[in-house]
Image (spheres, rainbow, N blue to C red):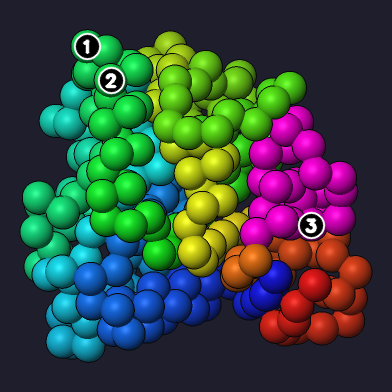
Amino acid sequence: MRIIIVNDYAEMSQRAARIVASHVILKPNSSIGLATGSTPLGMYNALIDLYNQEYIDFSKVTTFNLDEYYGLGSANPQSYHYYMYNNFFKHINIGMANVNIPYGMCKSIEDECNRYEEKIEEVGGIDLQVLGIGRNGHIGFNEPDIKFEAKTHMVNLDEDTINANSRFFKSIEEVPRKAISMGIKTIMRARKILLLAVGKDKAKVIYQMLYGKITPELPASILQLHPDVTMIFDKEAASLLESMKNIEAKEFSI
């Protein structure tokens, strides 16, 4: 596991963008798993800049988003379809036929989850999966539970997640209570994983993820078992790590 500690959000975004860009340059037909929320926005902006400077070509890339709110259509401004299109896809040359996001208005949850897994298998799996981490340790929308959910599935969102995501809605009542998410097995089968985190509110869960026991009660702890993970934290997010003492910024492995 490779840990990169940077000074701030801007530096994290640039480092993350360079990792994704390098992967696409080396393998133009890469399959990339993408995340939403505030954390990866800077990375997407940096990737757009690299595209505009003609350093990177997305025309052969296939993407798979981690999740989508159940009950929100793609035109809803709070949907992850809307987020991805407006913050990333419309600014680059990716073919929309190569974009995959769970459909929140599906009639059959089981059919939609199976369809999503089949699409991932059709391209040979995910080459690089980008993750954030929730304050309760969720990755994707895989909430703390008594077991690890294997594949794409329906999730009942925890109150902590609902409260955290309410900042994107007019009121907490508008936040959906369910979502469709890639499961832990699907995430763990990605060949490479890139996890991003910023802020002091993530420091405790990052420490637990790296040094605690592997348990479904902290879903991100499973990443301890993945053979190729890179994590980028700002100094505040990494403030509880022993390796952070008396340093400004650092890169190391555990």
| Front residue of this view, candidates 12 and 105 | 105
Mark 1 Cα within 10 Å, few/some/many (few <14, many 20+)?
few
Quarter of the figure with the N terminus: bottom right
Q: CA distance from mark 3 to mark 2?
A: 35 Å
| Front residue of this view, candidates 236 and 192 | 192
Residue 86 at x, y percent in the picture: 18, 50
Q: Are marks 1 and 2 in contact (CB under 8 Å)?
A: yes
Task: Give the side of residue 47 with respect to residue 227, left or right.
Answer: left
Task: Answer with mark 3 or mark 2, whichever residue precedes in sequence.
Answer: 2
Quarter of the figure with the C terminus: bottom right
Task: Answer with mark 3 or mark 1, whichever residue precedes in sequence.
Answer: 1
In this rendering, the label closer to the viewer, 1 or 2: 2
Secondary element under disc 2, as helix, strand or loop, is helix
Instruction: Quickly name the residue at label 1.
Output: 107
Instruction: Quickly name the residue at label 2.
Output: 111
| Front residue of this view, candidates 249 and 4 | 4
Q: Quadrant of residue 80?
A: top left
Q: CA distance from mark 3 to mark 1?
A: 39 Å
Report the number of numbered marks. 3
Please check the rendered image and state whether residue 221 is part of the magenta-colored stretch, yes or no.
Answer: yes
Q: Is residue 13 above or below residue 208?
A: below
Mark 3 Cα within 10 Å, few/some/many (few <14, many 20+)?
some
Residue 169 visible in image = no
In this rendering, the label closer to the viewer, 3 or 2: 2
Task: Give the side of residue 96 with respect to residue 114, left or right.
Answer: left
